[in-house]
Image: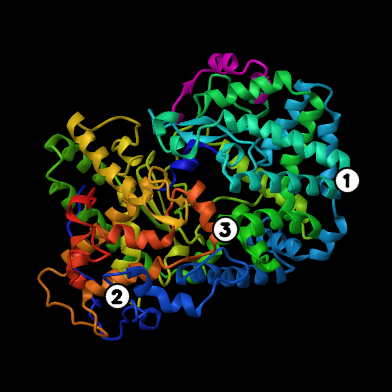
C-alpha cells in the first residue's frame, strides 16, 4: 500500500447566511423513532440517540456493521443495480461507450453459470507463466506482470505527490505481500492471533487444494507461504508507526534503490513499467525492501513460485468459481469479520463495477441521483465550516501568532471537492466482453494500474479524485490539502435537502469538520499550506499540540470493546482528533449561521442544539459484530462507532450545556481530563 493511500483519511470565508429555507416548516428534524427514551442522554448518549433503531434493525447476515448510515450505503447499490441492469439490457450500445463497458462487465459478472463452468481455467495461464520461470531473474519478470494486474507483491509501486515538491508526482515503492490484516497478526503472541495464524494456514491449504494441489503439497505450500510472509511482517512497520509521514519519507535515487535491494533487477522492472531510471521516487520502508532482497537470495525458486501463485489466487479468488469464492469468504468474511453469509451476487457485481470502472458508472449515477441543488447546499456548508475553523484557530490561546498565521494560510488553500470530478476518465479503450468475466476483471485492473502509473513523473493533476462518485465516504489528502465528498455520501442520514439545518450540521456538518480537522491532526499538521511535509509550528506550539493529542490518545486507550481488548489511542488519534474538532467546529458553524436571526423553534421537544447532537449520534450509530470489532481495534485507524459518539461529545462543554448534564455525569469528562485540540 502506498503512503498516499494511508494518508487519504483526507482566502478566508465569511459565514454566509443560513439557508433561505432553513426554517421552512416542511423540513424535518431527527428521527424520533430511533431514540431510546429509557436511556439518559447524559449517561449514555450513544444508546439514547440510536438505541431503538439498533434494537429494531439487527445487523443483516451479510454485513459486519449496521446503522442508518450503512443501510444508506447499501441502498445506494440498489441504484447502481438499476443503472447496470439497464446498461446490460442494451444490446445495441456502441463498442467503447459507457453503456457497453459497464453493461457488459456487469452482465459477464452476473453470468454465474459460465463463471462456475470455467472453474480454475482462467488462472492456469498465469500459473503457467510462474512455472515457466527458470530462475529468480525470470521470475521477477512475471512478478512485474503481476503488478500490472494489481497483484503487487512482495512490494508495490504507485503514484504519489512528492512530499517535498507536492506539485510533482513521483513513484512510490511500498511494502506489500501480506495476506493477514496487518503485520501484528503474524507476530503477536496472544491466543486470538495464534488462532488466526492457524486458521490462515488451513485456509491457504484449502485454497491450494481447490487449485489442484494434493493434500500434502497444499499443506507444505501453506507453511512455506506463512514462513515467507512472517519474515516480511517482521521487517514491516506497525500500524502506529505508519501513521507518521516521516517514517515512510525516503526520497531515493535509482542507485540507492539498487544498493538497497541489489538482487532485484530494477533496470528491467522500470523498463517494464515504462519509467526512466532517473524518475523521482520514494521508498516507504527500506528495511522491508532489504528483507525482500534477502529472500530473493535465500528463498528457493520453488518456494517463490508457491508464494506468487498463492498471492495471485488470493487476489482474484472472488472472481473465480463458487468453491473459491466460498472458501475466500469463509476465512475473510466469516472468521475474521463474523459475517454469516455473502452479499447477493448482483451486489458483489455492482461493487466490482464501481471498484474498476468507477467513474464510468459514477457518471451515470450522478446524472440520475445527484441534483445541482445538493451540490450548492454542500458548497455553502463547506464554506461555513472552513470559516468556523478559521475563527476557532484564531481563538486558540495556546497558539502563537506566527503559528496561527501559517494555519490561516493552510485554511485559505483548502480545496473542497463535492459530488464528482469536473473531468471524467476515459474507459473507451478498455476491452470488455459479455462472455469473459475473469478477463474483464483483468482488463479493469490493468486500466486502474496504467491510469495511475501514467501520472508518475508529471505535474500533479488536481482534478483527479481518490474515490469514485457513488462511494459513501469522504477523505482529506494532506499532500494536496483537499477535502473530498463524493455524491454517494450526500444522502440521508448524512445529508438531506429536506432536513433542518441543525440536523444537516450535526451529520454531514460534523463529517465536513472532521475532514477539515484532518488537516490539523497528528498527521495533517505535519504538512504545510502547499502540501509539503515540513514543520510550520513554533517549538512551543508543537509541544502544546502534541500534549493535547496525547490527551485524546489516552482517552481512547481506556475504551474497551471486551475484557483485555481496548482501543490503541495512538492508532486512532488522527480520526479521534478529526471527530473532536469536527463536532466542535460544526457546532460553531451552525451557531454562527443563526446570528442576526430569530432563534429557531424547538422541534419535537428538542432544542436546535439537541437536534444537532442527536443527528451525530444517529448518523454514527453503528452496531458491530464482535469479530469485526476486534479486527477494527487491531488494524483500523477509526474507533468503534460507539466511542466516536461518546468520545468527542464528552469533551464538549457545548454538549453538557445543551443537555444540562451535571458535572459528574458519565457523558461529561472532568475538567482536568477534558481534551481540547480544536
On screen, residue 572 versus residue 330, left or right, reads left
Q: Is residue 599 left or right of residue 258?
A: left
Magenta range is 248-269
Q: Is residue 305 left or right of residue 516?
A: right
Location of residue 426 with respect to 251 vertically, above or below: below
Crowding around mark 1 (Cα neighbors within 10 Å: few <14, some 14 to 19, many 20+) is: few
Q: Secondary structure at mark 1?
A: loop
- Secondary structure of the residue carrying numbered label 2: loop
Alpha carbon distance from label 1 to label 2: 59 Å
How far apart marks 3 and 1 lie (CA) works out to 31 Å
Where is mark 3, residue-wise? 627
Q: Earlier in the sequence, mark 3 or mark 1?
A: 1
Q: Are marks 3 and 2 in contact (CB under 8 Å)?
A: no
**First in sequence: mark 1 or mark 2?**
2
**Few, some or many C-alpha atoms within 10 Å of disc 3 (few <14, some 14-19, many ≥20)?**
some
Q: Which residue is mark 2?
A: 40
- Tell me the number on the disc at residue 212: 1
Residue that extends furthest to the left in the rendered view of this protein: 596
Nearer-the-camera pick, 299 or 245: 299
Residue 262 within the magenta-colored segment of the rendering = yes
Amino acid at each position: 500500500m502506498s503512503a498516499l493511500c494511508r494518508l487519504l483519511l483526507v482566502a478566508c470565508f465569511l459565514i454566509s447566511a443560513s439557508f433561505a429555507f432553513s426554517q421552512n416548516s416542511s423540513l424535518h428534524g431527527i428521527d424520533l423513532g430511533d431514540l431510546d427514551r429509557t436511556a439518559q442522554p447524559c449517561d449514555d448518549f450513544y444508546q439514547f440517540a440510536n438505541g431503538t433503531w439498533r434494537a429494531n434493525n439487527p445487523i443483516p447476515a451479510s454485513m459486519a456493521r449496521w446503522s442508518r448510515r450503512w443501510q444508506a450505503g447499501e441502498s445506494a447499490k440498489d441504484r447502481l443495480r438499476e443503472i447496470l441492469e439497464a446498461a446490460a439490457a442494451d444490446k445495441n450500445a456502441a463498442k467503447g461507450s459507457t453503456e457497453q463497458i459497464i453493461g457488459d462487465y456487469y452482465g459477464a459478472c452476473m453470468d454465474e453459470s459460465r463463471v462456475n463452468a470455467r472453474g480454475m481455467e482462467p488462472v492456469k495461464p498465469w500459473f503457467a507463466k510462474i512455472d515457466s520461470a527458470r530462475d529468480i531473474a525470470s521470475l521477477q519478470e512475471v512478478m512485474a506482470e503481476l503488478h500490472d494486474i494489481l497483484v503487487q507483491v512482495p512490494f508495490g509501486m504507485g503514484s504519489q505527490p512528492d512530499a517535498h515538491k507536492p506539485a510533482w508526482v513521483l513513484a512510490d515503492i511500498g511494502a506489500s505481500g501480506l495476506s493477514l490484516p496487518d503485520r501484528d497478526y503474524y507476530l503477536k503472541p496472544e491466543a486470538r492471533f495464534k488462532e488466526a495464524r492457524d486458521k490462515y494456514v488451513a485456509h491457504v491449504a484449502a485454497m491450494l487444494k481447490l487449485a489442484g494441489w494434493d493434500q500434502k503439497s497444499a499443506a507444505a505450500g501453506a507453511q512455506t507461504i506463512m514462513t515467507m510472509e512472517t519474515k516480511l511482517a517482521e521487517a514491516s512497520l506497525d500500524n502506529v508507526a505508519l501513521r507518521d509521514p516521516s517514517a515512510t519519507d525516503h526520497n531515493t535515487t535509482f542507485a540507492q534503490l539498487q544498493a538497497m535491494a541489489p538482487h532485484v533487477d530494477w533496470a528491467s522492472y522500470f523498463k517494464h513499467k515504462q519509467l526512466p531510471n532517473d524518475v523521482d521516487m520514494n521508498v516507504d520502508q527500506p528495511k522491508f525492501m532489504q528483507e525482500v532482497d534477502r529472500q530473493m537470495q535465500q528463498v528457493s525458486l520453488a518456494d517463490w513460485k508457491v508464494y506468487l501463485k498463492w498471492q495471485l489466487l488470493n487476489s482474484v479468488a472472488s472472481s473465480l468459481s463458487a468453491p473459491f469464492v466460498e472458501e475466500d469468504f469463509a476465512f475473510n468474511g466469516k472468521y475474521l469479520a463474523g459475517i454469516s453469509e455473502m452479499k447477493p451476487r448482483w451486489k458483489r457485481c455492482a461493487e466490482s463495477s464501481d471498484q474498476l470502472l468507477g467513474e464510468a458508472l459514477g457518471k451515470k449515477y450522478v446524472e440520475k441521483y445527484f441534483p445541482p441543488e445538493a451540490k450548492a447546499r454542500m458548497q455553502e456548508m463547506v464554506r461555513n465550516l472552513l470559516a468556523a475553523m478559521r475563527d476557532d484557530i484564531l481563538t486558540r490561546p495556546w497558539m502563537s501568532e506566527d503559528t496561527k498565521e501559517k494555519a490561516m494560510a493552510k485554511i485559505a488553500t483548502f480545496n473542497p471537492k463535492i459530488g464528482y470530478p469536473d473531468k471524467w476518465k476515459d474507459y473507451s479503450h478498455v476491452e470488455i466482453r459479455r462472455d469473459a468475466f475473469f478477463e474483464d476483471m483483468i482488463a479493469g485492473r490493468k486500466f486502474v494500474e496504467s491510469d495511475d502509473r501514467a501520472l508518475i513523473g508529471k505535474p500533479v493533476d488536481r482534478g483527479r479524485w481518490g474515490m469514485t462518485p457513488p462511494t459513501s465516504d469522504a477523505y482529506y489528502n494532506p499532500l494536496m490539502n483537499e477535502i473530498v465528498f463524493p455524491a454517494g455520501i450526500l444522502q440521508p442520514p448524512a445529508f438531506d435537502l429536506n432536513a433542518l439545518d441543525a440536523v444537516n450540521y450535526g451529520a454531514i456538518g460534523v463529517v465536513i469538520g472532521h475532514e477539515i480537522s484532518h488537516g490539523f491532526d497528528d498527521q495533517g499538521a505535519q504538512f504545510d499550506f502547499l502540501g509539503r511535509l515540513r514543520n510550520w509550528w513554533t517549538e512551543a506550539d508543537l509541544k502544546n499540540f502534541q500534549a493535547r493529542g496525547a490527551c485524546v490518545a489516552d482517552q481512547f486507550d481506556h475504551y474497551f470493546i471486551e475484557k483485555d481488548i481496548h482501543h490503541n489511542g495512538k492508532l486512532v488519534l488522527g480520526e479521534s482528533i478529526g471527530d473532536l474538532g469536527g463536532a466542535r467546529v460544526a457546532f460553531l458553524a451552525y451557531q454562527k449561521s443563526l446570528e442576526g436571526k430569530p432563534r429557531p423553534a424547538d422541534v419535537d421537544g428538542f432544542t436546535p442544539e439537541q437536534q444537532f447532537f442527536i443527528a451525530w449520534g444517529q448518523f454514527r450509530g453503528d452496531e458491530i459484530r464482535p469479530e469485526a470489532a476486534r479486527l477494527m481495534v487491531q488494524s483500523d485507524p477509526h474507533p468503534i462507532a460507539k466511542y466516536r459518539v461518546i468520545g468527542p461529545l464528552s469533551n464538549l462543554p457545548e454538549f453538557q450545556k445543551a443537555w444540562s448534564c451535571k458535572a459528574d455525569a458519565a457523558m461529561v469528562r472532568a475538567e482536568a481530563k477534558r481534551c481540547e485540540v480544536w
